[in-house]
Image (cartoon, rainbow, N blue to C red):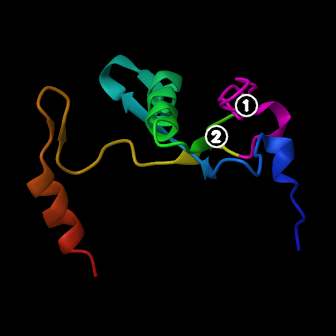
Amino acid sequence: MVDLRLSDYGATPDKPDVFVQVNYTQTRSCVLWVFNCSTRNRRPSLAAMSDVATAFKTHGIRIHIDAGQDSVMNPDTGDPWGSLSRAGKVLSAPARLQGWNDSTGMNWTTQYDCIARRP
């Protein structure tokens, strides 16, 4: 059994707290005719996570989003997670999703049909 002192993470008994761990993926794609490979992290932006925290705060709830060492652990003080972070470990993802088109975005019908056909 793990014994966590949530106060070490900025929680206090006077307000409700929600803890969220955000992992993200990394994709790698290569174009063989120009011998070029690129890697793209699909991590949510710190600004987007700040917007989520603000939305929770308007309802009196503190959200602690662990999305890596530089994300905000304590919404009251702005302290980052630092070495306490357990998120951000990059997971492997396919280089291309079925239904994705770089110029038009996601064709959700194609994506759904691919998932529906899986055993």
Which region shows up in magenta? 70-86
Dot 2, how many residues are within 10 Å of its Cα: few (below 14), some (14-19), or many (20+)?
A: some
Lateral position of residue 60 relative to residue 48, left or right: right
Q: Residue at coordinates 53% horizontally, 25% vertically from top-left? A: 46
In the image, residue 81 lies in the stretch drawn in magenta: yes
What x and y, as percent, mark residue 76? 69, 28
Q: Residue at coordinates 19% horizontally, 73% vertically from top-left? A: 116
Amino acid at dot 1: Gln
In the image, residue 3 lies in the stretch drawn in magenta: no
Q: Secondary structure at mark 2?
A: loop
Q: Secondary structure at mark 1?
A: loop
What x and y, as percent, mark residue 19? 64, 51
Q: Which residue is mark 2?
A: 88
Mark 2 vs mark 1: in front: 1
Check the image and name the residue furthest to the front.
14
Front-lying residue, 41 or 67:
67
How far, Cα to Cα, is label 2 from label 1?
8 Å
Amino acid at dot 2: Gly
118 is higher (above) or lower (below) than 26: below
Front-lying residue, 48 or 24:
48
Q: Which residue is mark 1?
A: 69
User: Mark 1 and mark 2 in contact (Cβ < 8 Å)?
Assistant: yes
Lateral position of residue 83 relative to residue 79, left or right: right
Which SS type dominates the magenta stretch?
loop
Q: Residue at coordinates 20% horizontally, 29% vertically from top-left? A: 102
What x and y, as percent, mark residue 33? 31, 22
What x and y, as percent, mark residue 63? 59, 43
Q: Residue at coordinates 48% horizontally, 22% vertically from top-left? A: 47
Please report whichever mark, 2 or 1, sits nearer to the chain's N-terminal start: 1
